[in-house]
Amino acid sequence: MDLQRNPAGAPGPDGRHSGCHSGSDPGPGGTGPPIGQTAMSDGEFARLSAKVLALTGIELPPHKRQLVISRLRKRLRALGIDGFGNYLAYLASPAGEAESSEMVNAVTTNQTAFFRERHHFEDLAQILARRPGDAGGRPRRRIWSAACSTGEEPYSIAITALGAGLAGPGADLRILATDLDTAALARARAATYPAGRADACPPECRQGYFETLPGGQVRVAASARRLITFNQLNLHGSWPVQGPFDAIFCRNVLIYFSPEAKLSIVERFVDLLHPGGTLYLGHSEAMLGNHPQLVNQGRTIFRKCA
Ligand SMILES: C[S@@+](CC[C@H](N)C(=O)[O-])C[C@H]1O[C@@H](n2cnc3c(N)ncnc32)[C@H](O)[C@@H]1O
């Protein structure tokens, strides 16, 4: 018998009813499970953090405990599981195998925006335009968005390339967009956003690259969508990707990893870049130290030595 799975309302294995047992605030209208604090002991947090680290490379320092609780509480509710001890037991059981992916989706931070750090896209347009053709042929341009979240980053890359006239008919430009989070990837593939999200684009990019849907949402135009391949990829695992790349975007994810993991991932990026290729990191990821093959261009832009 699976003691961890506990239909809402049924008593848990410890005789308690499902829901949050240490909270005091009831759900909307006073019905349904309470939405207050669900306690997580030090030991439970340590076990969960170790699991997240092993699966994703993400470090969860003690001050993140409340954030983790609030994100995972939804999973406990969805499963009708009472308490994090039971959730951990469920994760470790054969029945809970698929839950690891849901847990990872819940703990990852997906914050992103179109044209976030716009100077990176200005730099990208320049380096892509400089790319020479191969032996009498057209230039082959490859870009990897390595933690693409809900898609705004790779679509910004696509719109940049189209706007610079580098990705129209006959051009050989492809964008690989990967993330660990399957729910974020599903949203990225859908390419559909609340209308206000597109306001972050430079004015010249708002025209022509978005279609307005009935209901007011916007969808990225097919011309940009067709340039991108979305795949799940764990930066903390093996990378089934084919380089070399002209540019790799890996922004606002390395901050969650240990210094050793960061360095090893950057090493692997360097191996996958063309000579002269560019690595774009997030604004708080400047402290890479000196890499013998990367020249710091400022503003977290790193060029591989030619
Ligand atoms: C804050 S978002 C950054 C999105 C985008 N790069 C940007 O800067 O706007 C971080 C992304 O990294 C992803 N991520 C976290 N750990 C990962 C891992 N081990 N492998 C691949 N992606 C990971 C998360 O799912 C999330 O979508």
Image: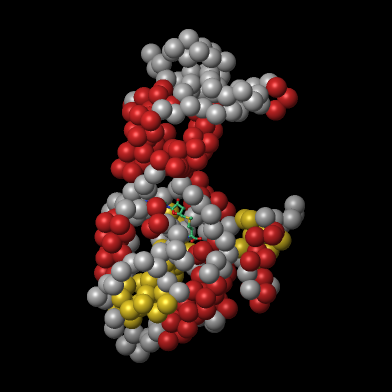
In the displayed image of the protein, which residue is found farthest to the front?
A: 63
Quarter of the N terminus within the rendering: top left
Which residue is pictured at 48% across the width and 10% down the height? 15
**Left or right of 66: which side holds 3?**
left
Q: Is residue 226 above or below residue 237?
A: below
Q: Quadrant of residue 252?
A: bottom left
- Residue 232 seen from this side: no
In the displayed image of the protein, which residue is found farthest to the top?
A: 15
- Protein image colouring: secondary structure
Q: Quadrant of residue 195?
A: bottom right
Front residue (pair 230, 125): 125
- Residue 153 seen from this side: yes
Quadrant assignment for ligand 1:
bottom left
Q: Position of residue 143 (x, y in %)?
A: 41, 70
Which residue is pictured at 29% across the width and 51% down the height? 237
Q: Is residue 13 above or below residue 118?
A: above
Q: Position of residue 141 (x, y in %)?
A: 41, 76
Q: Is residue 69 above or below residue 297?
A: above
**Left or right of 195: which side holds 117?**
left
Quarter of the C terminus within the rendering: bottom left
Front residue (pair 6, 209): 6
In the displayed image of the protein, which residue is found farthest to the right?
A: 215
Which residue is pictured at 61% across the width and 63% down the height? 220
Which residue is pictured at 53% across the width and 14% down the height? 17
Q: Position of residue 136 (x, y in %)?
A: 35, 89
Q: Position of residue 142 (x, y in %)?
A: 40, 72
Q: Is residue 148 above or below residue 21?
A: below
